[in-house]
Image: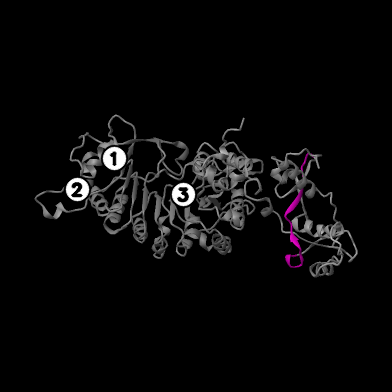
Amino acid sequence: MAPGPTLADLPVELFLQIISDERLSRRDWKALRLACPRWAHHVAYLLFRRICISRLRKDRSNFVQIATTPHLAAYVRQLVWYELDLEMWTFQTAQDMEMTSLMKKAAGDLKLFWLPLRTNLTLAHEDEAVRSFSSPFTKALNLLPNLNTFISCAMPGDRILSHYDGYTLQAGLYIVNQTTSRIIGGNDGFFVFMLPELRRRSQIKSLQWAEEGTDTSLYRLRSASPHGFSALTSIDLCIGNSEEISLRRLALCLSGAEELRHLSLCFERALHGPGHQVFLEAICQLCDWPYLTSLHLGGVQLPWDSLGPFCRRHYKYLRHLTLVMCEVTVPDLVLLRGRPSEEDEETRDKPILRLDSITIRSDDDEFTCLLPQEAILPFVNRTSSYIDHAPGEIRTEISIYDHHTHSTAAYFDSQLDEFHHAYSNTALREISGEEEEEEDSDSEYDSSSNGDFKDTQEKTYWAWGRLSPSGADTYYWQVPDAASADAATTAWEFAHRDGRRACGDDPLEYFSDWESGAGDAAAPTPYCEALEDFVGRRWRRRNDNDDDDDTPSEEEEEEEEDLPKQPPSGAGARRYSFNNPWTVAKSLRLLEELGLPDGGM
């Protein structure tokens, strides 16, 4: 009976939909990648589409290593900067003085943080550590050909920074005791590194930015900042308590995003006040985005007198409107659709909305009326003049508060749609490579999660030859560079910690629990097709008795003249053996493909 179809037989589109399920972890993806070579490419995209960097030394090291590995760099689409403002942490407020002392020691440890705690009031861009990394950061970005998104957000509170002096240090320990009044800093990664790159990288099309704390760092925007927004097509901002001058600078930056398609402004972490409403009024009056397709506003009292005309001004492309915790009423929808009058020639020809969706989310309480989207859309688009006149607030969906994501986004939507917030802890773990069940986040950069084994190994080179024209044996030795080599290393001999051995180009083909730091070792070998072909040429000539003419051809004579080769002094030439592990492994694979037993040769 023929075997039935398997997961590998599915169309690529269905397979990608299955493996992208949010219930699968990075650990699951790593196992999938090893299960079938056909899946490796698709799973690698999920593993490396987002990479992260932070002031942690291990995050910076992993970022650089992925960027300098070409086949991994090609998968990267999003770069996330985990912000951790150590300077805002106050030592005095911690109750446990022993832990406070440990945290202070860790914050200044250069082995843990490449950007350590700054003890004076200098800005981050004045720090020597920042200046020394600016050029390597730019060079690393140049190696990411498909990068299109910058993300800056607070490091998740449950992120394990280190197992320091026997204590588990989490980011939340530095976050909970931060001061409420900002003096310097905030979102250093964005303002010091990402924003300058935005100004000179037109391929960055999407920006997702969330305040690191409840107070804003927008005051760090400068007059040259609008130019950095000019190529952006998607902007998602979560804004904290802000002064009017900071919001004015932000409005100026947003006005420069001439190609903008999607805009999301979230004020859920800020105190309600007139400043944010004035900011929205300024945007509605000053900004013109002819290709705006979707608008998402959250946690703010909306200026409907300005928002209605703004939406109608963008009627040609605006198709999706989402309002979260904005206290929307039916009279507000009237202002959104406009009030055309048959007697008024000026208003009769005003553009009308063509929305495909309107989503209104708010808390579930007895004073909020639930109206289906299907009942609201015709009214807003003016294809119907009727709508249920519900008293008080209205909503189309319920917002579910999620305490896990409060530090980065105040509300988690019950339905996953195109406006789903990017800063949930699940998404951040996916970016950082951490698992909920994995306590140790200090593991070394290992080949099992980051591509081909050969790309993690030091480059080694080999040369070979016969030490005399009449010699039958082939010898090989290591050489220092590619110029004097016959080939680079493509196969390693693997020694597992339990005594098993194998030879190939990836230890995970033989040992699923391979760990370089746990006693497993890999030694470079010269074995490859080129060496085997070199050895075989002499033996093919010796054993070819079918040809009566023993006179070698000109090509054979030229090869014979090149055969004698002396290894450099001290190179340690070794004799080639046909019983080497690479040839044996190759023969066994051939037998397996032919369906023969191991001894069937």
Is the residue 22 above or below the residue 317 in the image?
above
**SS state under label 3:** loop
Q: Earlier in the sequence, mark 1 or mark 2?
A: 1
- Please state the horizontal and vertical placement of residue 69, each as a whole percent of the image: 62, 56
**SS state under label 2:** loop
Q: Which residues are magenta?
A: 481-498
Q: Amino acid at mark 1?
A: Glu
* Camera-nearest residue between 500 and 141: 500
Q: Amino acid at mark 2?
A: Gly
Cβ atoms at labels 3 and 2 below 8 Å apart: no
The disc at residue 212 is 3
**SS state under label 1:** loop
For the residue carrying disc 3, how many other residues have a C-alpha within 10 Å: few (<14), some (14-19), or many (20+)? many
- Please state the horizontal and vertical placement of residue 489, each as a whole percent of the image: 74, 57
For the residue carrying disc 1, how many other residues have a C-alpha within 10 Å: few (<14), some (14-19), or many (20+)? many
The CA distance from mark 1 to mark 3 is: 26 Å
* Colouring used for the render: one colour
Residue 29: say if magenta. Answer: no
Is the residue 307 above or below the residue 325 in the image?
below
Q: Which residue is labeled 2 in the image? A: 338
